[in-house]
Amino acid sequence: MLNRLVSVLIGACCFASVGALASPVTWDLSPVTLSDGGMASGSFTYDAATNTFSGIDITTTTGSLRAGGVYTFPSSVGNASTPDFLNLDLPVDVGVTERLDIFLSAAMTNAGGAISGNLEEFTCIAAGCSFTTGTEPGLNLRDGNAVITANVVPEPSTVPLAGLALLALAGATRLSQRGRR
């Protein structure tokens, strides 16, 4: 009976500690050298549970093709594989609105890690430009190889839960060994 109770306690502690990794994660963009010599860097927060972006603060510097920009607004099409940001509120204005996409090699999760990809910054400079893919004619485009990283630190509640689970496991082992004697 006591062994069963200890097993249930261990399982509950382990299950409860998993929830601590379910919160939004801040991703840092390592400095990216763009094709025209400009640079991009900054960070944003992504919540995989709701597919939402917040805390966007990405800056690009001037290069030979275009001036730099500041990105603080998520587009409506960004997702776990393609963070997509605008430097102005909607509507998108041809020749004015700048857009920054990061095409990632893997989808972001709330577990963090490091993901490589390709960053593209562009403005539509032709009336027929749809701003849909970033590859259609009529774009003022520059790009570069990007890496985003997020180090997930367990919430403080995870540490006590993990410790409690280990204590329960040690107790169960000790009880089991006593029963064998």
Image (spheres, rainbow, N blue to C red):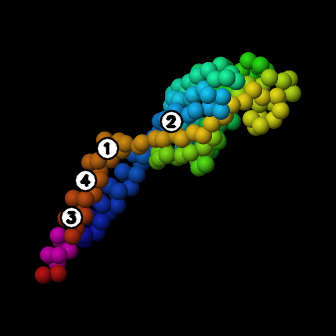
Magenta-colored span: 174-179
Side of 42 where 68 appears, left or right: right
CA gap, disc 4 to disc 2? Answer: 35 Å
Label annotation for residue 163: 4
Label annotation for residue 62: none
Q: Position of residue 96 (x, y in %)?
A: 73, 18
Assess whether mark 2 and mark 3 are in contact (beta carbons under 8 angstroms).
no
Q: Amino acid at mark 1?
A: Ser
Nearer the observer, 138 or 15:
138
Q: Residues within 10 Å of mark 1 (few under 14, many from 20)?
A: few
Label annotation for residue 170: 3
Name the N-terminal-most of marks 3 and 2: 2
User: Which mark's residue is nearer the viewer, 2 or 1?
Assistant: 2
CA gap, disc 4 to disc 3? Answer: 11 Å
Q: Residues within 10 Å of mark 3 (few under 14, many from 20)?
A: few
Side of 137 where 54 appears, left or right: left
- Helix or strand or loop: what does disc 1 sit on? loop
User: Which mark's residue is nearer the viewer, 3 or 2?
Assistant: 2
Q: Quadrant of residue 76?
A: top right
Residue at the (25%, 70%) spot, across then down: 3
Side of 11 where 114 appears, left or right: right
Assess whether mark 3 and mark 4 are in contact (beta carbons under 8 angstroms).
no
Residue at the (21%, 64%) spot, across then down: 170
Q: Position of residue 85 (x, y in %)?
A: 63, 29
Q: Quadrant of residue 32?
A: top right
| Residue 21 seen from this side | yes
Residue at the (14%, 75%) spot, across then down: 178
Say whether residue 109 is magenta: no
- Write down the residue under mark 1: 157
CA gap, disc 3 to disc 1? Answer: 20 Å
- Write down the residue under mark 2: 30
